[in-house]
Image: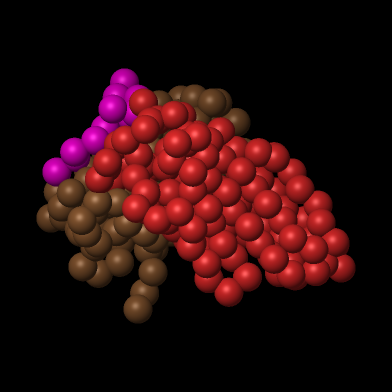
Chain colours: A brown, B red
Amino acid sequence: EAGVVQSPRYKIIEKKQPVAFWCNPISGHNTLYWYRQNLGQGPELLIRYENEEAVDDSQLPKDRFSAERLKGVDSTLKIQPAELGDSAVYLCASSTPRSGAGELFFGEGSRLTVL
Amino acid sequence: GENVEQHPSTLSVQEGDSAVIKCTYSDSASNYFPWYKQELGKRPQLIIDIRSNVGEKKDQRIAVTLNKTAKHFSLHITETQPEDSAVYFCAANSGAGSYQLTFGKGTKLSVIP
């Protein structure tokens, strides 16, 4: 079965420019997550979707970050405008509905460099 | 919210020796504790997890122990091999049944041949 697919794998932009990341979760996984991983750190949750509904976005910097998951499948994460501190790897993950928490399946990530 | 502390940040062991990584968590309601392995430039992948209704779980050379009273859990890797070299992350969910995971900062394990 195909894993979580993300694109682009790498993106270099200048500050104040916009950027968007795309994620296609594993088929049948209705829970989708966006995490940010700074260099030398663990992943930090930005937003979680149950189908098309954002059920946890408390850590998403809403002044410049936005996300959507149309039709409850693919998702995009956008940053506008990007700042130097946004340089990080943006990881998408998905999971199946289970009683309580369960395994997250991560994509390869999108590495963002803001110059 | 949940706070997860992980130690050590780096660990070097000789091939064949054991490696132990320790984590503590703050939310007594947490009930799910996974461990992820991330090789350089790759995605994090689950290697083992434990729920609060058990104290220990083993899978071949990997084991995890959980002490709910002390709020800490540990990863044990025996007979280490060079391919075990990676960054390991512990995590805990934010409250019973929560889907939100808080990750530790990671431990870079180097297995020296």
In the displayed structure, B95 sits above or below A95; it is above
For the point 50% across and 35% down, the residue is B70
Q: Nearest the camera: B15 or A29?
A: B15
For the point 66% across and 38% down, the residue is B7
Magenta segment's dominant SS is loop
Residue B62 percent location from the top left of the image: 59, 65
For the point 61% across and 43% down, the residue is B22
In the displayed structure, B85 sits above or below A21; it is below
Is A74 left or right of A21, judged from the image as shown? left
Is residue A58 one of those drawn in magenta?
yes
Work out which quarter of the rendered image holds the N terminus of chain B and state it: top left
Q: Which residues are magenta?
A: A53-64
Q: Nearest the camera: A105 or A4?
A: A105
Work out which quarter of the rendered image holds the C terminus of chain B and state it: bottom right
Count of number-bearing discs: 0
Is A73 left or right of B72, judged from the image as shown? left
The image quarter containing residue A96 is bottom left
Residue A79 percent location from the top left of the image: 38, 33
Report if residue B56 is visible in the image. Answer: yes
Report if residue A42 is visible in the image. Answer: no
Is residue B33 one of those drawn in magenta?
no
For the point 40% across and 56% down, the residue is B54
Residue A103 percent location from the top left of the image: 36, 59
